[in-house]
Amino acid sequence: MMPAAGPHDSQFVYVASAKFSERGEPEYVNLLHLDTRAGRATTVNRPGDARSWLLDNKGEPRLVTAVDKNNSTLWYREPASGAWRTLASFNSYGGGKDAITPVAFAPDGAVRARQVRAVPLRRGDRQARRRAAGLSEGLRLQRQPGDRQRQGARREPAQ
């Protein structure tokens, strides 16, 4: 079931349904609009091979990230017409100036996102290793007593 903001008093929910290749690789993710009383589901129209969906503050599908070979495209669904339009396209593995991962919608409807970027790893570059591990802003690496290296390290919010 997809996490959604807004009232939870409806008989309808959205459910993600992934399709995998014979080799176990993800191909796409359909979004199903499920009527929990009637037990019927309809598939939401998706642009391209959707990999992730984001529901807005009203619980409606609003953003999709689709992947085609090495390129990711961020699609936005217009509230009035339901038509999808491209917001950004970028290399899935190399990042770029438009490379973002939508995280949530703010109360005012703005999209909260993380910027995706390729991180060069050089021997002894502690900052690069921290960025690659997702330990950039707001997080710090805390070692447990007795740890020699990164074994047993955990993420903790910065003070």
Image (cartoon, helix red, strand yellow):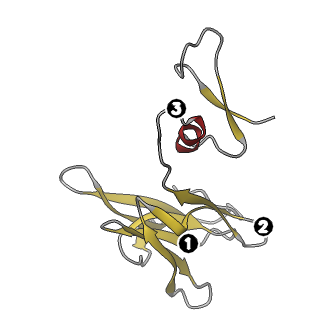
Q: Earlier in the sequence, mark 3 or mark 2?
A: 2
In the rendered image, residue 42, in percent from the top left (x then y), is placed at 42, 73
State the CA–CA distance, disc 1 to disc 3.
Answer: 43 Å
From the image, tell me which residue sits under label 2: 107
Which residue ends up furthest to the bottom in the rendered image?
81
Q: Is residue 32 left or right of residue 7?
A: left
For the residue marked with disc 2, what is the amino acid?
Answer: Pro
From the image, tell me which residue sits under label 3: 124
Which image quadrant is residue 40 in? bottom left
For marks 2 and 1, give the one nearer the viewer: 2
For the residue marked with disc 1, what is the amino acid?
Answer: Pro
Q: Earlier in the sequence, mark 2 or mark 1?
A: 1
Q: Is residue 153 above or below residue 31?
A: above
What mark, if any, has residue 61 been given in the picture?
Answer: 1
Other residues around mark 1 within 10 Å, as few (<14) / some (14–19) / many (≥20):
many
Circle 2 — which element? loop
Q: Is residue 9 left or right of residue 93?
A: right
State the CA–CA distance, disc 3 to disc 2.
Answer: 42 Å
Which residue sits at x=68%, y=71%?
58
Which image quadrant is residue 140 in? top right
